[in-house]
Image (cartoon, rainbow, N blue to C red):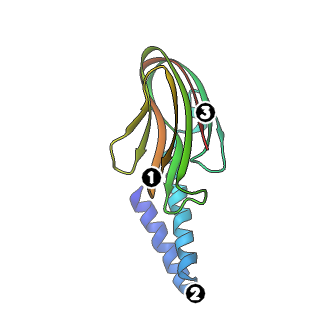
C-alpha cells in the first residue's frame, strides 16, 4: 500500500510542478491522497457485525452492534491525515457490554501500541488528541458475546 501511495504522490507532485500549483495546493492534494488511502484500512460496512453511520468524516460517526461468539477485529473509525479539517480533538462515548468471552475497544495511532479504551462492561467517555498520521478506533473480541454503542464526534 505504501508503494501505491508513494506512486500517487509522485504523479501528483509531477503534475503539480508542470501545472504551476502552489506549495499549499500540492500539500492539500497530498493530504487528500493520504486520507483516501487511510479509509482503505477501515472494515467495510458490509463486513461489520453492526450498523455504522458516518459523521462529518471517517473519524466520526456512530456504531452499534450485537455480537455472538465474535473472534476478530473490526476497524470502525479513523484514517490517515496530515491535517484533519475538523481538528485534532475527538470526543468518544462508548458503552460496552461483555456477556461472554473478552472484548476491548481500542485506539491505535501510527506504529504505536494500541491503547485500550474499555474492555469490561461499562462506559468510556473522553476526548483524545489525534497525532498526525494514522489513527483508528476499533473493537477486538475473542469468543465475544455482547454489544457495543460507540459515538465519536
- Pointer 1 or 2: first along the chain: 2
Q: Secondary structure at mark 3?
A: strand
Label pair 1/2, CB-CB below 8 angstroms = no
Residue 83 in percent (x, y) is at 52, 63
Label pair 3/2, CB-CB below 8 angstroms = no
- Pointer 3 or 1: first along the chain: 3
In the image, residue 66 above or below residue 46: above
- Pointer 3 or 2: first along the chain: 2
Nearest to the observer: residue 47 or residue 24 = 24
Residue 138 in percent (x, y) is at 48, 36
In this rendering, which labeled residue sits more in front, label 1 or label 2?
A: 1
- Which residue is rendered at x = 57% and y = 57% of the image? 87
Residue 103 in percent (x, y) is at 43, 24
Q: What residue did someone put label 1 on? A: 134
Gap in Å between the C-alphas at discs 3 and 2? 43 Å
Nearest to the observer: residue 102 or residue 73 = 102
Gap in Å between the C-alphas at discs 1 and 2? 30 Å
Q: What residue did someone put label 3 on? A: 63
Amino acid at each position: 500500500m505504501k508503494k501505491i501511495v508513494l506512486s500517487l504522490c509522485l504523479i501528483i507532485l509531477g503534475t503539480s510542478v508542470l501545472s504551476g500549483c502552489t506549495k499549499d495546493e500540492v500539500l492539500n492534494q497530498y493530504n487528500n491522497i493520504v486520507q483516501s488511502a487511510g479509509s482503505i484500512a477501515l472494515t467495510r460496512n458490509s463486513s461489520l457485525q453492526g450498523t455504522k453511520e458516518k459523521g462529518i468524516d471517517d473519524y466520526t460517526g456512530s456504531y452499534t452492534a450485537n455480537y455472538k461468539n465474535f473472534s476478530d477485529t473490526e476497524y470502525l473509525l479513523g484514517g490517515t491525515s496530515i491535517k484533519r479539517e475538523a481538528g485534532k480533538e475527538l470526543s468518544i462515548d462508548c458503552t460496552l457490554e461483555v456477556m461472554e468471552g473478552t472484548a476491548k475497544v481500542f485506539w491505535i495511532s501510527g506504529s504505536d501500541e494500541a491503547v485500550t479504551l474499555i474492555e469490561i462492561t461499562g462506559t468510556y467517555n473522553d476526548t483524545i488528541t489525534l497525532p498526525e498520521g494514522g489513527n483508528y478506533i476499533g473493537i477486538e473480541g475473542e469468543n465475544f458475546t455482547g454489544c457495543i454503542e460507540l459515538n465519536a464526534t
